[in-house]
Image (cartoon, rainbow, N blue to C red):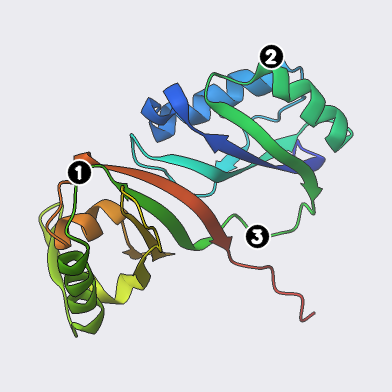
Amino acid sequence: MKANYVQRLRIEFSKDGPARFIGHLDLARTLERMINRAQIPLAYTQGYNPRPRMQLASALPLGFTSDCEVADIWLLDRIDPEASRRALAPKSAPGVEIRNLYEIELKQPALQPEEATYLVTLLDPVDGQALAEKVNQLLTAKQLPRERRGKDYDLRPLILDLKIMDRIESPIQLLVRLSLLPGKTGRPDEILAALGFDPVAAKIHRTELVLKQPDTSD
């Protein structure tokens, strides 16, 4: 069956404010509505249940914020990317801000996130020295057995970096870099639980997504 799209655009956007309470599926629907309101010719799958030709890089858990979200969309007709950005920006939902929009090649592989970095702000007073010791225990541990959805897993190999940010005043912040590979996805709330903190008592903000780069060896 012939493809019904001719162009692929990548949207980089932030998710903050009221948008932090939008779940992953609702976010996809929100983006679809924004794109349609901006009269961008979004392509849809064919068949009895057409779906928008759109892919989000990585689901952001409810309540988290981010300034580095990524979505690819496929279009029925070619359009100037800058014109798309100008049309889309004023149609954005509250808390969703378009940071960048540009064209990528159709043949590029699907979005494949490999790692993510989060800035975690601890909202309650914390003993800095005790926290430093807990962080060191996590980093020096050979294994960190945990359970997720009834299945056991090892948290340690999912932690790529974990450190306390240099801050003189409260609140204390942690920089957490985690794997996002298939079957090896780390979550910052699980890091907080391993450190003995209630994830609800923290603000979690995604600051960077690292995507797998396309193979240019050919």
The answer, for residue 150, to whether it is visible in the render is yes
Residue 195, quarter of the rendered image: bottom left
What residue would you read off at disc 3?
109
Specify the quadrant that holds the C terminus: bottom right
- Residue 87: x and y in percent read 79, 21
Q: Classify mark 2: helix, strand or loop.
A: helix
Amino acid on which the number 1 mark rests in the picture: Asp
- Residue at mark 3 to residue at mark 2: CA–CA distance: 28 Å
**Depicted 117 relative to depicted 58: above or below:** below
Residue type at mark 2: give it. Answer: Arg
Q: Nearer the viewer, residue 27 or 196?
A: 196
Q: Regarding mark 3 in the picture, which secondary structure is present there? A: loop
Which residue, given by chain and number where applicable, does mark 2 sit on? 37
Foreground label between 1 and 3: 1
Q: Earlier in the sequence, mark 1 or mark 3?
A: 3
Q: What is the quadrant of residue 163 in the picture? A: bottom left
- Kindly identify which residue carries mark 1: 124
Contact flag, marks 1 and 3 (Cβ < 8 Å): no
Q: CA distance from mark 1 to mark 2?
A: 42 Å
Q: Secondary structure at mark 1?
A: loop
Give the crowd class for mark 2: few <14, some 14-19, many >=20 residues within 10 Å.
some
